[in-house]
Image (tube, helix red, strand yellow):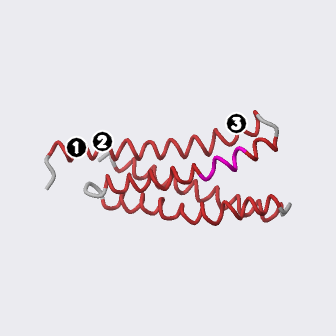
Amino acid sequence: MLTPFLAQALDVAALLVSALLFGGMTLFSFAFAAFLFTALPVADARTLIRRAFPHFYLFVIGTAALGAALVWARDPWSCALLALVAISTVPTRQWLMHAINAATDAGQRRRFVQLHGLSVVITLLHIALTGVVLARFIR
């Protein structure tokens, strides 16, 4: 059994990690990528974004997994949501990201649009699920 102090410390840590995940995904998705394509020539922006995405996905996997572990004792549903975010990011990083790059390299515009659209939907779902986790702290 957790002491009240330890339970509160875990709650605070879980909240902060979940907020970091939510904010990090939102900032990267809506600001960083768009900024790169307005601040740099397209070829340079494409190169930089390709280098950044593997690290972004590792951030999502690690932060979501840590958040799930921290929130487990407090809220098993939030734990499950964060675990889902972490687990579903693995194929996104290992397969989808590479498929998007391959479609771009091969000049397959239609395939790129479809795959990129799928990655956007996945990221928006991850942001929404993390938002649910944050909302569950208010009860």
Image: 23 above or below 117: above
Helix, strand or loop at label 3? It is helix
Residue 13: % across, % down: 32, 43
Which numbered dot is residue 12? 2
The residue lying furthest to the right in this view is: 107
Horizontal side, residue 98 vs residue 132: left or right: right
Residue 79, image x, y percentages: 36, 59
Point out residue 1 in the picture as x, y percentages from the top left corner: 13, 56
> Disc 2 to disc 1, how far (Cα)?
6 Å
SS for dot 1: helix
Residue at 62% from the left image edge and 46% from the top image edge: 29
Query: Which residue is disc 3 drawn over?
Result: 35
Main secondary structure found in the magenta portion: helix
- Residue drawn at (57%, 40%) of the image: 27
The magenta-colored residue range is: 48-54
- Given residues 108 and 22, the one toward you in this image is 108
Q: Residue at x 64, y 55 (%)?
A: 120
Q: Is residue 118 magenta?
A: no
Quarter of the image for residue 89 reads bottom right
Task: Name the amino acid type tagged 1.
Answer: Gln
User: Which amino acid lies under the numbered mark 2 shown in the image of this protein?
Assistant: Val
Residue at x 69%, y 62% (from the top left corner): 98
